[in-house]
């Protein structure tokens, strides 16, 4: 099958190329009549546009036939599949036919350039449509799988239950029993880790932003800003083992020296490392919004006899606040969706606790746990992952929308 | 106190710097002998990096009155204005040299804190720049920073008086909590004047305060400036000859970093001595 597809694609490429060169040659010959003999008559499109037009039409025809063949073959039923060589023949023949037909169009006033423009527009549009449709498809599949889950477990149970133990629900005698799918502990764990992360990242990120935009010299800024942005590029799995192998044990050792027993995997270990990860989101975005506060406002404040720090806290920060909130919300939504760090460092126990020194679990961790290993595809246990995914999606979507709205509103204010 | 200072501080205006004399450009009016000079400038130069924007300005600014600075774009009017409240200090690469006395005291000496100086010398900018705060908080900003009011009632009083002096009170008294950025351009400009007045300055510097305003708002602003000159020393940069003629008592014409001519406004506009001044005010250059 793979072989078949590959050769068909090669065939399409060849027909396209041939049509292009053929079209260009014909165009050169025919148009030479107008330019070669010195009459100086202008023609609408250069020869290579005619070539591109012929190539594009051939490619389009071939792709349509290819897709049609695939579609017919994919239909269930007794009809025998169309044999590959037939498809290939059809493609070659129709491409030749289309090319020959188009050749008749090549004249000095044929607007091949316009049509090529149209081809390019359509190709670009197609790509964006594919991206949008894919997103839509993902959302719909999340939605439908979640609906299947909610047929078995009530949505009310899911959103308000305090007990999360999906494994027990798989046992024969209590399959699908409600009560095991209460997601509150997971949401609480997610929230706890996120809170720790923001607690770490917000102050540090904001200080960095203020330093960069108001105090640092151009040169320092040019070095420090990219250096911090590197933090955002570190693979999250690296953060994960950093949290598990360095931060977790350190926290535990520290707590033990104070006489507390703390597990290696804890909300604080995962949260603090996640906080470090999202620092660049906050610092970079906040730096941008602080910079967007017009210099005239600072001047106005200085001219009233305010010091730099008074100006910073009372005028600049106040002006940039909506944008900073937007930056924080984006960072939060990033933190909520983060998986690797929490999988490695937060633990898996669905504890309902507000104590950051305990192991907690998050939505993302549970999705991983539910879907790794051998699965039945329509057990509530597996479907629960979709429901969790949907919740996650909705929360991050809402956060992103709010953040964007806030940032936009802020932008308008000074324009 | 003021009387004492001004009487001991009687200075006469000299523009006869040796270089100018050599270049034969010495036709600066001499009738600027004040017995009430607020500022006395001697050989003031402003540099931006290696560029010298002002080439040694000698000039007195009278107290209680309006002094207009005019001249073609880029001649150094704004740079000169920023000398008086040391706003040039906030520009990286900017340097000021020479001597600037305010009431006889060198404002560039080490015992002057620019932050405190700016409370005495307020400034209004070309584009209205109200803070993204309520009208009330905009005006209360300075008094709060400098601790001018002990109680809320006192602060309310300062805000009201300042807005009244700024000619804005009647228009905004019912919506003091609305954002200052929501006012019209002319109202915003009067708001920032009120904001400057609120810290009880002695001098108000204005850099083309009407250039972003329509004629009606400009007229209101000019009326306001005319009232304020009773109590404040006002220095205003303007591109409008008519405006300078209407509101100022003294006018200084700058050209390419030099003070070319300085004197009574009426004299400058009716009978300028320097050819460049004449060309500029009649619209032949600029
Ligand atoms: N922040 C700055 N950095 C560098 N050079 C500056 C700066 N501000 C002003 N200059 C230069 O100093 C000279 C005088 O500028 P200034 O702004 O004082 O002129 P101006 O008379 O106010 O002009 P305009 O009427 O256009 O406002 C100009 O050559 C200008 O390029
Ligand atoms: Mg200027």
Image (cartoon, coloured by chain):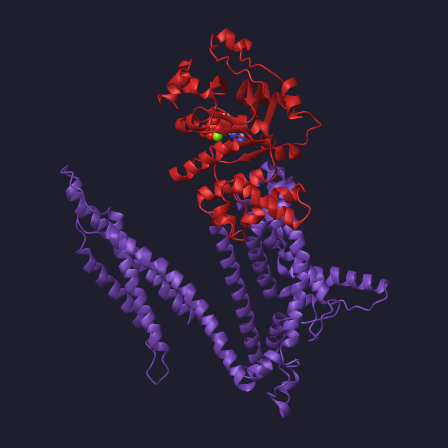
Chain colours: A purple, B red
Residue A149 sits in quarter: bottom right
Q: What residue is at 53 percent from the left and 83 percent from the top?
A: A150
Q: What residue is at 78 percent from the left and 62 percent from the top?
A: A251
* Residue ranking furthest to the bottom: A173
Question: Is residue A410 visible in the rendered structure shown here?
Answer: yes
Residue B252 image position (x, y, % from top left): 48, 21
Residue A328 sits in quarter: bottom right
- Left or right relative to B276: residue A272: right
Residue B43 image position (x, y, % from top left): 58, 17
Q: Give the answer, above or below, for where A97 lies relative to B101.
A: below
Residue A168 image position (x, y, % from top left): 66, 85
Question: Is residue A88 visible in the rendered structure shown here?
Answer: no
Q: Quadrant of the N terminus of chain A?
A: bottom left
Q: In this orientation, which residue lies closer to the viewer: A12 or B203?
A: B203
Q: Give the answer, above or below, for where A13 lies relative to B105.
A: below
Q: In this orientation, which residue lies closer to the viewer: B73 or B67?
A: B67
Residue A324 image position (x, y, % from top left): 58, 53
Q: In this orientation, which residue lies closer to the viewer: A129 or A267?
A: A267
Q: In this orientation, which residue lies closer to the viewer: B269 or A235?
A: B269
Q: What residue is at 34 percent from the left and 78 percent from the top?
A: A81
Q: How many marks?
A: 0
Q: Give the answer, above or below, for where B11 lies relative to A222.
A: above
């Amino acid at each position: 099958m793979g072989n078949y597809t590959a050769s068909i694609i090669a065939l399409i490429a060849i027909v396209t190329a041939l049509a292009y060169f053929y079209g260009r040659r014909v165009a050169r010959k025919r148009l030479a009549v107008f330019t070669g003999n010195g009459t100086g008559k202008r023609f609408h499109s250069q020869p290579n546009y005619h070539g591109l037009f012929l190539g594009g039409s051939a490619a389009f025809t071939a792709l349509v036939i290819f897709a049609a063949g695939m579609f017919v073959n994919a239909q269930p039923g007794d009809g025998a599949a169309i044999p590959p060589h037939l498809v290939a023949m059809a493609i070659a023949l129709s491409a030749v036919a289309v090319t020959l037909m188009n050749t008749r169009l090549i004249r000095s006033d044929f607007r091949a350039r316009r049509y090529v423009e149209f081809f390019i527009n359509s190709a670009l549009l197609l790509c964006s449509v594919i991206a949008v449709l894919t997103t839509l498809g993902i959302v719909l599949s999340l939605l439908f799988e979640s609906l299947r889950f909610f047929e078995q477990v009530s949505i009310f149970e899911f959103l308000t239950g305090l007990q999360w133990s999906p494994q027990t629900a798989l046992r024969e005698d209590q399959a699908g029993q409600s009560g095991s799918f209460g997601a509150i502990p997971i949401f609480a764990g997610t929230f706890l880790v996120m809170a720790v992360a923001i607690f770490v990242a917000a102050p540090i990120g904001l200080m960095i932003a203020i330093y960069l935009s108001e105090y640092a010299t151009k040169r320092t800024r040019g070095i420090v800003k990219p250096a911090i942005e590197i933090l955002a590029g570190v693979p999250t799995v690296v953060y994960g083992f950093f949290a598990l192998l360095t931060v977790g044990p350190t926290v535990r050792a520290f707590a033990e020296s104070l006489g507390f027993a703390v597990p290696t995997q804890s909300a604080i270990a995962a949260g603090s490392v996640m906080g470090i990860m999202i620092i660049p989101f906050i610092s970079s975005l906040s730096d941008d919004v602080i910079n967007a506060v017009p210099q005239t406002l600072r001047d106005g404040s200085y001219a009233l006899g305010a010091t730099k720090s008074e100006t910073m806290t009372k005028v600049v920060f106040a002006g940039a606040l909506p944008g900073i909130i937007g930056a924080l919300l984006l960072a939060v939504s990033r933190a909520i969706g983060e998986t690797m760090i929490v999988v490695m460092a937060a633990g898996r126990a669905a504890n309902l606790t507000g104590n950051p020194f305990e192991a907690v679990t998050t939505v993302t961790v549970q999705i991983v746990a539910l879907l790794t290993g051998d699965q039945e595809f329509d057990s509530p246990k597996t479907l629960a992952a979709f429901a969790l995914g949907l919740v996650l999606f909705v929360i991050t979507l809402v956060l992103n929308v709010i953040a964007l709205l806030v940032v936009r509103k802020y932008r308008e204010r000074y324009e | 106190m003021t009387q004492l200072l001004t009487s001991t501080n009687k200075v006469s205006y000299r523009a006869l710097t040796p270089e100018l004399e050599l270049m034969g450009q010495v036709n600066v009016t001499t009738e600027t002998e004040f017995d009430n000079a607020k500022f006395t400038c001697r050989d003031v130069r402003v540099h931006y990096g290696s560029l010298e924007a002002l080439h040694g300005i000698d000039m007195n600014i009278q107290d209680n009155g309006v002094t207009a600075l005019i001249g073609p774009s880029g001649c150094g009017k704004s740079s000169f204005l920023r000398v008086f409240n040391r706003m040039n200090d906030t520009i990286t690469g900017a340097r000021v040299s020479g001597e600037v006395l305010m009431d006889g005291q060198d404002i560039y000496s080490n015992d002057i804190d620019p932050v405190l100086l700016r409370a005495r010398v307020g400034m209004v900018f070309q584009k209205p720049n109200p803070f993204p705060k309520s009208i009330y908080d905009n005006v209360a900003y300075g008094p709060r920073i400098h601790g001018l009011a002990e109680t809320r009632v006192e602060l309310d009083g300062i805000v009201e008086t300042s807005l009244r002096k700024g000619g804005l009170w009647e228009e905004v008294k019912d919506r003091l909590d609305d954002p200052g950025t929501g006012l019209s351009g002319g109202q915003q400009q009067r708001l920032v004047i009120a904001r400057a007045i609120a810290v009880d300055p002695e001098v108000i510097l204005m850099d083309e305060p009407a250039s972003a305003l329509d004629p009606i708002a400009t007229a209101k602003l000019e009326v306001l400036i005319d009232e304020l000159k009773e109590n404040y020393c006002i220095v205003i940069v303007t591109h409008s000859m008519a405006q300078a003629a209407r509101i100022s008592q003294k006018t200084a014409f700058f050209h390419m970093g030099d003070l070319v001519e300085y004197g009574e406004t009426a004299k400058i506009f009716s009978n300028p001595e320097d050819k460049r001044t004449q060309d500029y005010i009649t619209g032949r250059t600029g």
